[in-house]
Image (spheres, rainbow, N blue to C red):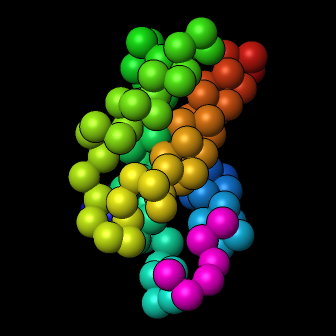
């Protein structure tokens, strides 16, 4: 099963739209959403870690720099926005589920 098949369809559509809007230009020619999916999923996984709360979010960037293993062009500096978006999207999804 593909990783994207594990996502809620609404979340996947949101991530696809973000990737389409965010990753344009010559560096990203020929890439597909599936190429970015590991970064989004990494961020979503980190959102489950209670260590990263609103008071220490700057640590998230340091943790990602040290643990993200992407290869060019998917190095942390180029892909960090997908990681951060995945993190924020997962936290939003969790907050919405708690309100329901």
Q: Position of residue 3 (x, y in %)?
A: 35, 58
Image quadrant of residue 84?
Answer: top right
Q: Nearer the viewer, residue 36 or 12?
A: 36
Q: Nearer the viewer, residue 55 or 14?
A: 55
**Going by the image, does 56 lie left or right of 25?**
left
Q: Residue at x 46, y 28 (%)?
A: 60
Magenta stretch holds residue 57: no
In this orientation, does residue 44 appear?
no
Q: Residue at x 27, y 39 (%)?
A: 67
Q: Position of residue 38 (x, y in %)?
A: 37, 56
Q: Which residues are magenta?
A: 22-27
- Quarter of the rendering occupied by the C terminus: top right
Q: Residue at x 47, y 18 (%)?
A: 52
Q: Nearer the viewer, residue 57 or 45?
A: 57
**Going by the image, does 29 lie left or right of 94?**
left
Q: How many marks?
A: 0
- Quarter of the rendering occupied by the N terminus: bottom left
Q: Residue at x 38, y 65 (%)?
A: 74
Q: Position of residue 81 (x, y in %)?
A: 57, 51
**Going by the image, does 89 lie left or right of 36?**
right
As displayed, is residue 57 above or below residue 74? above
Q: Position of residue 29 (x, y in %)?
A: 51, 88
As displayed, is residue 97 above or below residue 45? above
């Amino acid at each position: 099963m593909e990783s994207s098949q594990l996502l809620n369809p609404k979340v996947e559509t949101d991530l696809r739209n973000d990737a389409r809007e965010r990753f344009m230009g010559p560096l990203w020619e020929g890439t597909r959403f599936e190429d970015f999916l590991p970064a989004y999923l990494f961020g979503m996984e980190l959102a489950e870690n209670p260590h990263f709360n609103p008071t220490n979010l700057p640590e998230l960037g340091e943790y990602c720099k040290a643990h993200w293993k992407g290869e060019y062009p998917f190095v942390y500096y180029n892909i960090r926005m997908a990681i951060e978006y995945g993190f924020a999207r997962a936290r939003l999804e969790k907050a919405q589920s708690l309100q329901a």
